Image (cartoon, rainbow, N blue to C red):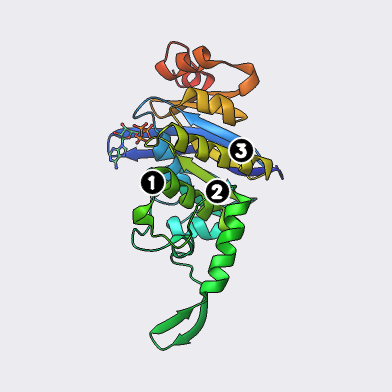
Amino acid sequence: MSDIVLKTENLTKHYGGVHALQEANFELRKGEHVAIMGDNGAGKSTFVRQITGVEQRTDGKIWFDGKEVNFAGPIEAREAGIETVFQNLALADDLDVPSNLFLGREKVLFNLGPFSILDRKAMRKATEAALVRTAVKIPNLSSTIRHMSGGQRQCVAIARTATFASKLIIMDEPTAALGVQETAQVENIIRTLKENGEPLILVSHNMRQVFDLVDRIVVFRRGRIVANLRKQDTDGNDIVAYITGAKTGQAELQAA
Ligand SMILES: Nc1ncnc2c1ncn2[C@@H]1O[C@H](COP(=O)(O)OP(=O)(O)OP(=O)(O)O)[C@@H](O)[C@H]1O
């Protein structure tokens, strides 16, 4: 049990009559990179929203870092060490890179009533360290996010997840909107996270990317986990068969 970072037991979410997530049993171990795959509407993002505290589950249990958790909101999940990179990035367009990395967690030198003087030097130093740690290359830290490409913005978002010693990084389709080169850059960061032993959940539709980057693939279909396979025990055709329902998994068979 001790090397398990995240575990869910019968995790379930209903939106009225929509059974978006049904009794999902999932485990992630230390240093492991796991992909979540599935067709549109299969329940992948719903799963992520339950474990990151964005929504409250209908049923089931979640353990994180050795404790059972009931996050009241995403800030509690983040404080516990879960960092999430969503498709729609929460970056501030008019701020530079260090300010974005420290958004909401600025290092303060002085508090003068309602005003605070930020420790820009410390923030810049920590930013440089985070970029080295994640192998992210940003040519000019002082440029505002507005002037960056989609790939650079995504890299800043990912560097942010690695700045605060997160215990788990979740990326929900991090390259969906990126070009070839930008995708390659984000994938390099993911490889660096793997080398650093940082566990990751990667939601992706990209089969090549998944087989390149992760150790294990979990397939969702109609709200249920229908496959949980080590990369070396499967291939693209097999995964597609689970995604489309041509092949049925244990969870689905049990439910039938
Ligand atoms: N807030 C909501 N209210 C009602 N139904 C919802 C809500 N959010 C998701 N759903 C439904 O739950 C199901 C699972 O949706 P979810 O977004 O988790 O799928 P997904 O696998 O992430 O799909 P995609 O790859 O398209 O992002 C879908 O049928 C979706 O329409």
Q: CA distance from mark 3 to mark 2?
A: 11 Å
Position of residue 23 relative to residue 158, above or below, is above
Q: Judging from the image, what secondary structure is the residue with disc 3 in?
A: helix
Mark 1 neighbour class, 10 Å CA radius: few under 14, some 14 to 19, many 20 or more: few
Give the amino acid type for the residue marked by disc 3 in the picture.
Answer: Arg
Q: Return the residue at label 1.
A: 149
22 or 229: nearer the viewer: 229
> Which quarter is ligand 1 in?
top left
Distance Cα–Cα, label 1 vs label 2: 14 Å
Residue at image mark 3:
191
Quadrant of residue 150 within the rendered picture: top left
- Looking at the image, residue 44 lies above or below residue 118: above
**Are the residues tagged 1 and 2 within 8 Å (C-beta)?**
no
The amino acid marked with disc number 2 is Val
Q: Are marks 3 and 1 in contact (CB under 8 Å)?
A: no
- Is 87 on the left-hand or right-hand side of 184? left
Residue drawn at x 39%, y 33% is 43
First along the sequence among labels 1 and 2: 2
Asked if residue 164 can be seen in this view, the reply is no
Judge left or right: residue 70 versus residue 40: right
Amino acid on which disc 1 is placed: Ser
**Disc 2 marks which residue?**
136
Q: Is residue 255 above or below residue 241?
A: below
Task: Give the mark nearest the N terminus, 3 or 2.
Answer: 2
